[in-house]
Amino acid sequence: MPDGFVPILDLEPQYQALRPALQAAFERVCRSRQFVLGEEVAAFEDEVASHLGVAHAVGVNSGTDALVIALRTLDIGPGDEVITTPFSFFATVEAISLVGATPVFADIEAESFNLDPHAVAAQITRRTRALLPVHLFGRPAAMGAVLELAERYGLAVIEDAAQAFGAQYLPPCVGCNGQGCHPTTQTRLHGRYVGTLGTAGAFSFYPSKNLGAYGDGGLIVTNDARLAERARKLRSHGSLVPYQNEMLGYNSRLDGLQAAILRVKLPHVTGWNAARRRLAERYTARLAALPGVMPPAVTPGHVFHQYTVRLPRERRDAIRQALQAQGIGTMVYYPTPIHQLPVYAGRFPPQPVSETAAAEVLSLPIWPEMTDATWERVIAAVERAVAG
């Protein structure tokens, strides 16, 4: 990385702050000689389940496997349809295809980048088995509406919370006029962490995530004991007892070292998410005045895994290049909607809101320890790039 370059994410300050505890965790695992599953993984599963307020947490080796195994626990496979978003990381849809099911795309809301429940409702058929919403960039999806559809049609809901650890579902309270909320789906969910709202939730601990390991790692959470037991079997070659394999599974066990690292970080994630929100509020307040720039709303519960703006499509790439020339790193998440990627191209109808978003989005640097001086440098560079 060139001297003075501002990356989109800098993990060095976090490492330095936690270095003694991380080194102690590393030594503890090495002394235990339990490098795959073991006591560290079991302890992390208990701690993260308590943190999220969910009954069961099952550590696996990636967020992708968390999705695949969650689908398998529900026996979703050939002949089944799963409705999801075309505007996400490829793994969201790849997991559906890997279990033999058929992905069905519903377009997104332009403002939130998340699944539009009205578009979801239009795609439900007799073959639909599950809905797979994504809490993209750390913003909770419209889970009240999604779960009401699921209840109406008898569908499972698997949440892709890979980018949203610690995000809370906090929709505005409407309609009660101070007289108390009715027991609707919306109010039952209020204040709960995403990933715990549906049938099962899938998290990723890729190093760049709000709660990140130092390698791949993932987690399945559920309040259903039967699904949790199936997930534990599936992650370990279909067996809970050595050499007594009950089904075809995976080699998808969370490493003890990664679990120990995550145990060190877990108590800090709420504070880190609050710091991300403060930075996002500053960004949005400053960028709202720039012509042609549409900053994201700082909605309740949003944890800003990415801070993503919209720019005029004819200027997006030029602005990105201007920022690069000033030493500011950015990323486009995602330049091509999933239905247009080579593996799926030509098989699905247009998704116009997602296609527009892909041409307009740009993510700016954000991490909890970003200094005022670094933030001022980034925002000043953005102002110059937009003006130019």
Image (cartoon, rainbow, N blue to C red):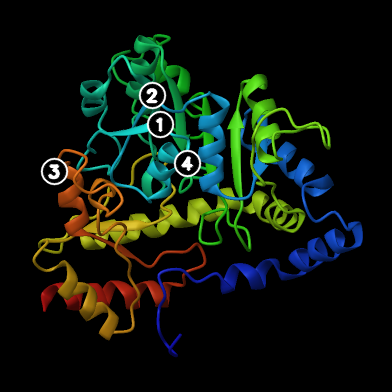
Q: Quadrant of residue 103?
A: top left
What is the distance, in whole Å, between disc 2 and disc 3 at their CAs? 27 Å
What is the distance, in whole Å, between disc 4 and disc 1 at their CAs? 20 Å
The residue carrying mark 2 is 79
Give the residue type that dot 1 points to: Ala
- Do residues under tags 2 and 1 come within 8 Å of each other at their CB atoms? yes
Which element type, helix, strand or loop, lies under badge 1? loop
- Do residues under tags 4 and 1 come within 8 Å of each other at their CB atoms? no
Q: Nearer the viewer, mark 4 or mark 2?
A: 2
The mark that comes first in sequence, 4 or 1, is: 1
Q: Which mark is residue 101?
A: 1
Residue that protrudes farthest toward the bottom in the picture:
3
Q: Residue at x 65, y 35 (%)?
A: 234
- Do residues under tags 3 and 1 come within 8 Å of each other at their CB atoms? no
Dot 1, how many residues are within 10 Å of its Cα: few (below 14), some (14-19), or many (20+)? many
Which element type, helix, strand or loop, lies under badge 4? loop
The residue carrying mark 4 is 161
The mark that comes first in sequence, 3 or 4, is: 4
